[in-house]
Image (cartoon, rainbow, N blue to C red):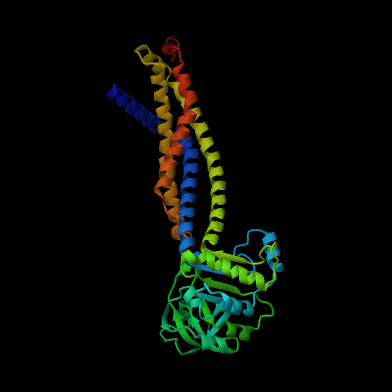
Amino acid sequence: MANTAGMAFGEAIRIAAASLWSHKLRSVLTLLGVVVGVTAVIAVVSFINGMNSYVAEKVFNLGADVFVIAKGSAVITNIDQFLEMQRRKNFSVDDYEALRAQCKRCVAVGGTLGSRREVRFGNNSLRDVGTRGWTPAMAKIYDLEIVAGRVYSEAEEARGAQVCVIGWDIVENLFAGVDPVGREIRIGTITYTIVGVGKKEGSALGQSRDNYLMMPLNTYLKSFQPARYSLRIWGKANGPAELEATMDEIRQILRGRRHLAYAQPDDFVIETQDAFLSIWAGISAAFFAVVVAVASISLVVGGIVIMNIMLVSVSERTHEIGLRKSVGARQRDIQMQFLIESATIAAIGGLCGVLGGVLLAKLVSWVTPLPSAIEAWSVIAGLLVATGVGLFFGIYPASRAAKLDPVVALRAE
């Protein structure tokens, strides 16, 4: 009995494949909706998986024990958040010094400011360089690796020494073939002595992570004298287990300094890598939901087309159905045959969609900085969804075929 069922299943698949092959243009049009829907889902899942890993490793790679304090979130998602942030009190060097002195749980506290400027060495220049005012502790917090020279000292920070550490882009563009350590580089009319070179980090989403010049925070303030500024203050806890307690201590210190009443909410934010990643996860989930909704429309259209084709197939094979019934085929045998054929057609479309989605994801990653990662579960899900669409939309044609009167069917031409 099992062998007979297996033969019937195999025969149904063979008939479905033969039908697709004998009507090539009709088959392409039949499968198009399923192929487009599955391709879109596979490609988007691949991009989101790739971006999630990429964002965690390169964009928000703060470390599990690092947090950032600022007057507003680094990721603004609406105008109300932006306006609220603008109304808040700025963070000053005094705030940084107070946290550094009072936070007992902190392993390190650092402060940063930044802008983009043109730097020069001799007659050569490089524009749009990320110019950073960093306290020396930031090298430890940010896990900055120096490949030549050193990081400037606390003494140099205190007196606002005109020293700097440069990224690899500046080395390659302005110091090709020359050891930059000990040489002088200019921003406007101000000269800085290079004391260190950072390790090459590559790019993130097409933006170089090596295009920077880092100097003591006091030097930055003295050099550029910003009229209004708000520091980003970084803290490092003694391991991930101490992160929450350290953040709570920082929060209490800041609320006291900013004279906030017990019932008043914080007028600042303390963010961790998990906070940034959760924001990104929300954005990517919303994007994925939109794409799935659009792909679902394509799959429904594809399913309707499959149903119409199967109804045509029932009409074309009425005599065959009558003949099979006359030799003992039951209604459920006829119904199962057409359901298997419908599911096979959809599964072939799903397989084409999976291949198309994988190729599209790899092609886009090859020609753009957008990363992708193919997950086995998404491939399996794509095939199962496509097959399910075929089964669902094949129920009516299969039921119609099963209910044909064998005598009437045998008379059909």
Identify whether 164 is placed above or below 202: below
**x%, y% of residue 193?**
50, 89
Identify whether 299 is placed above or below 13: below
Kindly indicate the quadrant of the structure image that contains residue 149.
bottom left
320 or 400: nearer the eye? 400
Image point 56% across, 78% down: which residue? Answer: 100
Q: 320 left or right of 218?
A: left
**x%, y% of residue 212?**
52, 77
Image point 33% across, 26% down: which residue? Answer: 11
**x%, y% of residue 136?**
51, 81
Quadrant containing the C terminus is top left
Kindly indicate the quadrant of the structure image that contains residue 351.
top left
103 or 411: nearer the eye? 103
30 or 8: nearer the eye? 8
Q: 71 left or right of 276?
A: right
What is the residue that sits farthest to the left in this orientation?
3
Task: Decide if residue 281 is in sight here.
Answer: yes
Task: Decide if residue 311 is in sight here.
Answer: no
Image point 27% across, 24% down: which residue? Answer: 3
23 or 234: nearer the eye? 234
Kindly indicate the quadrant of the structure image that contains residue 329.
top left
Image point 57% across, 54% down: which residue? Answer: 283
Quadrant containing the N terminus is top left
**x%, y% of residue 226?**
66, 80
